[in-house]
Image (cartoon, rainbow, N blue to C red):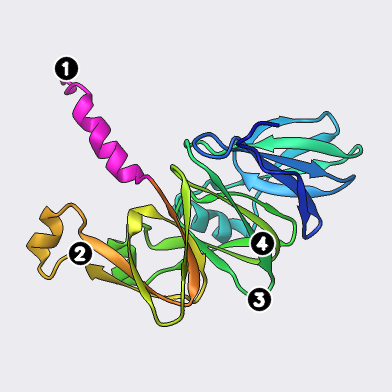
């Protein structure tokens, strides 16, 4: 185990650890006989011969379509230790860290688009529609992912993950492109970054999210949209034939 790896731990009947914390995190899950874990499509990196993987449409057709609208895949992977105990390794497509979140059955979490990696059997992943204003301007689309139930949830990020523990009554302004996860029901609203629209747009920020505590907000150190914009400046212009 490297210095960037967490210790093996068991929570809510799931044994796991996160390897290579930071830019290239890898999730290691130890499954008991007949135990399973659900994951984003194409998340499996390696698995023991005792483990089987299959595609599953959780939540039916509408659930699959909702995940597509929220930026996730239509199907989930289900990895089950069908022939005895087994270990599987899962990884996100983007470079970044992993965030283990323990769900106790009382509070769900909202995830950014492309933010779901895996969850234990007792966690349900669904989609929830935002209102028109949030859908148009938050950068998250009309649908976001909602995780609820009891078990372990593993969210992925682009870059490192930073936790903000916001006390009751206090506020924090966050660029929506840096959001990873936050508790369902936490109070937040969208605002212009500056007092005027022109100033907001020319500042490069546009709209921001103003959260009000109490609650823990998880943010990522990099913004995928900002990186895509930077990368476009480096690519040669495509010539049409």
Quarter of the figure that contains the C terminus: top left
Tell me where the magenta segment starts and ends, as one range: 222-241
Quarter of the figure that contains the N terminus: top right
Q: CA distance from mark 3 to mark 2?
A: 33 Å
Q: Which residue is mark 3?
A: 106
Residue sitting at the far bottom: 169
Q: Which residue is mark 4?
A: 102
As helix, strand or loop, the secondary structure at mark 1 comes to loop
Q: Residue at 72%, 44% (x, y): give it.
A: 7
**Where does residue 190 sit, x and y in percent of width and height?**
29, 70
Q: CA distance from mark 4 to mark 1?
A: 53 Å
Q: Is residue 143 left or right of residue 136?
A: right
In the image, residue 53 lies in the stretch drawn in magenta: no
On the image, which quarter does residue 200 sit in?
bottom left
Q: Earlier in the sequence, mark 4 or mark 2?
A: 4
Q: Earlier in the sequence, mark 4 or mark 1?
A: 4
Q: Residue at 24%, 38% (x, y): give it.
A: 229
In the image, residue 229 lies in the stretch drawn in magenta: yes
As helix, strand or loop, the secondary structure at mark 4 comes to strand
Q: CA distance from mark 1 to mark 3?
A: 58 Å
Out of 78 and 225, give the one closest to the viewer.
225
Asked if the residue at tag 1 contacts the one at tag 4, i.e. Cβ–Cβ closer than 8 Å, the answer is no
Q: Residue at 80%, 30% (x, y): give it.
A: 48
């Amino acid at each position: 185990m490297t210095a960037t790896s967490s210790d093996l731990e068991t929570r809510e009947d799931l044994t796991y650890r996160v390897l290579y914390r930071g830019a290239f995190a890898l999730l290691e899950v130890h499954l008991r006989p007949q135990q399973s874990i659900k994951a984003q499509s194409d998340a499996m990196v390696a698995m023991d011969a005792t483990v089987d993987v299959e595609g599953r449409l959780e939540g039916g057709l509408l659930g699959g379509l909702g995940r597509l609208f929220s930026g996730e895949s239509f199907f989930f992977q289900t990895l089950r230790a069908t022939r005895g105990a087994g270990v599987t390794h899962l990884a996100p497509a983007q470079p970044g860290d992993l965030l283990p979140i323990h769900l106790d059955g009382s509070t769900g979490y909202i995830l950014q688009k492309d933010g779901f990696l895996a969850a234990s059997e007792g966690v349900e992943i669904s989609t929830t529609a935002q209102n028109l204003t949030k859908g148009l301007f938050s950068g998250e689309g009309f649908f976001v992912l909602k995780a609820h139930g009891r078990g372990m949830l593993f969210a992925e990020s682009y870059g490192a993950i930073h936790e903000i523990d916001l006390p009751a009554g206090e506020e924090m302004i966050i660029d929506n492109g840096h959001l990873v996860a936050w508790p369902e029901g936490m109070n937040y609203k969208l605002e212009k970054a500056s007092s005027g629209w022109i100033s907001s747009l020319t500042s490069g920020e546009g709209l921001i999210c103003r959260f009000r505590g109490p609650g823990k907000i998880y943010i990522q150190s990099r913004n995928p949209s900002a990186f895509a914009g930077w990368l476009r400046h480096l690519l040669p212009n495509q010539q049409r034939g």
